[in-house]
Image (cartoon, rainbow, N blue to C red):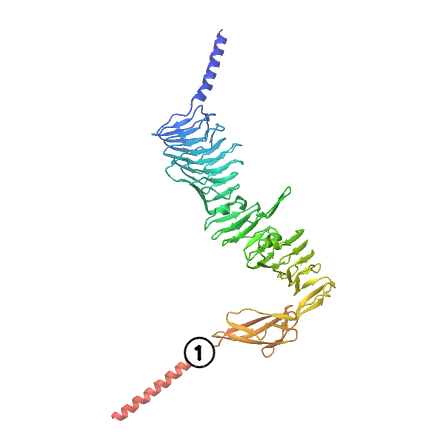
Amino acid sequence: MKNLKLFVMTTMAILLSVVSVHADTMPQEQDGKIVLDKNITLDATFKVEATKILTIDLNGHTLTGPSANYTIENEGSLTIVDNGTTKGKIVGAANNNSSTIRNNGKYLQITGVTIESPFICVKNEPDKTAVITNSSLTSTSNAKYEAILNYGDLAAVNSTIKGTNTASAVVSAKSEINTKAVKTTLTGCTISGLTPLAAGKDSSIEMNGGSLEGTLSRTQPGTIKITGEVGAKLSTNITNYLQTGAKLTISGEDDITQNYEIGEGITLVVGEDAELNFVKTVGKSTSVGSITIKGGKVEGEINGAKVYNETNTTYYGLLEQALVNAKADTTNNLILLEDTDETTTVWNKANQLNNTKDVNLDLNGHTVEGNFVNNTDKTLVIVDNSEEQAGAVEGTITNNGNLEIDNGKFSSLPVGEGTLTINGGTFPEGSLDDIELPEEKELQENEDGTISVVSTRYSINIKENENGTTTTNVAKAAAGETVELTYEPKKGYEFAKVVVLDKDGKEVEVINNSFVMPSGGVTIEVTYKKTSNPKTGDNIVTFMGLASISLLGLGVAVRSLKKENN
């Protein structure tokens, strides 16, 4: 009987102790402060009354909320910190109906605290103020719930804010009872979510520094402004919201499937590990993007683009895309940045805005693989301005418009019914037999069996010199023609020497300020030197001599006066 009584008493004690853990909602407040001394699971919402000024210190412990309501509801002035040597956290347990922390009081301050919630981590009610510093807020739900929902004035500093992959991280929105502007300020925060930031009508989000991950809507009912140094992918659509002076750093793999503009006063920093994919194929669908430097500047190299248009300062993923989007009413200078293997590149009359674009395509040492079709009435010029001039077109060019070839290597002569002008370039042997060459052009047979169109009059390149101007009597000259040089030094300078080098870097003899033009052109470099002045010593001697003569004359004059007076 004794044993039975002891068993009953022990069992009751255990049960009472379990009940007391759940019933003991929070430790006692002392001097306006509650310090947790153990992990606590609340049976009901902990509420801070309107007249209260209270600090809650997690002290390295975990505070878990009830399953059907807020974990903490603030009606007064509340500060939450975690001064534990090991960090605790606040865990919401209400899955879909209550925020973990609701602020409807005068003031809410959260510093150094981790908050996890299956719903909303922090909800700041209309016209209320909340400040979150050095904290971590994570929405753990698979539903569309944000980590922060702000209807008032909320600031987060140096904090990590994570929404779900189906929702926003931070939402700023105005309700019907707002009397003040709704403003969310984020400074140095790391923010991620399906849509990391969302601003509703008549509300704003201002972000200064930090980083973004996810995809911003390209348009927002409210206002989003991003300043400072920010890390994000272009695919977040962040460029729509960057303000003057902002500096965007991109790193890692980034899919450029739309057009992104780097506006006036914006700096784009392309990290060394950045890998930009301008063409992305998913199933049967292919997306091609571009980057336009519209008044901004770039630090680092924009990689992955096939073509750069100097005229509209845009990088493109495909050559055909660059041709179609060429700027109207002007000549577009396209530079090939990589080899392109588009099966067929079509520059089509129907896509050219009434054919108001001429295009210069610089192969830039790269190769166009595949066929090329020119159907416009405007002029397409193909040139290779690379030092090695290794650029090539390896497919068939069908020219039904105006095509001009200045140089480059071609696997075949263009076909079609358009106008063809060949000023240079290298072609298969025999392909140019029936081609009428422009004046001052001739054919040159190469060792590899190809044939090139070369100039019979060669260019003269004069290197600039700030101390004088050098001119020649002709701009170009044929091999064997005499070229005359004229030197015009600036004031205080005079001609020193001239060096003329042929295309291979060999010196060409200059006699009586003229030389005989070699094949292939020349480069002229003239040196001007300062005009010579008398040496300082000579000046001193001259001065002393004049002074001696003057003194001697003065002595003679004095003696003459004395004689007259006597």
- 276 vs 441, left or right, is left
Question: Residue extending furthest left?
Answer: 566
Q: Quadrant of residue 338?
A: bottom right
Question: Looking at the image, which is closer to me, 361 or 409?
Answer: 361
Which element is circle 1 on?
Answer: helix
Q: Residue at the spot x=51%, y=51% of the render?
A: 262
275 is higher (above) or lower (below) than 3: below
Percent position (x, y) of residue 360? 60, 60
Nearest the viewer among 147 and 286 is 286
Name of the residue lying farthest toward the top? 1
Across and down, in percent, residue 134 comes to 45, 38
Residue name at image x 28 percent, y 93 percent: 563
Give coordinates of residue 184: x percent, y percent: 43, 40
Going by the image, does 181 lie left or right of 355?
left
Compare residues 141 and 64 and report the one nearer the observer: 141
Task: Check the image and report above or below for 484 versus 225.
Answer: below
**Residue 162 can be seen in this image:** no
| Residue identifier under label 1 | 537
Whether residue 454 is visible to the viewer of this picture, yes or no, is yes
Q: Amino acid at mark 1?
A: Gly
Judging depth in this view, the residue of 197 and 525 nearest the camera is 197
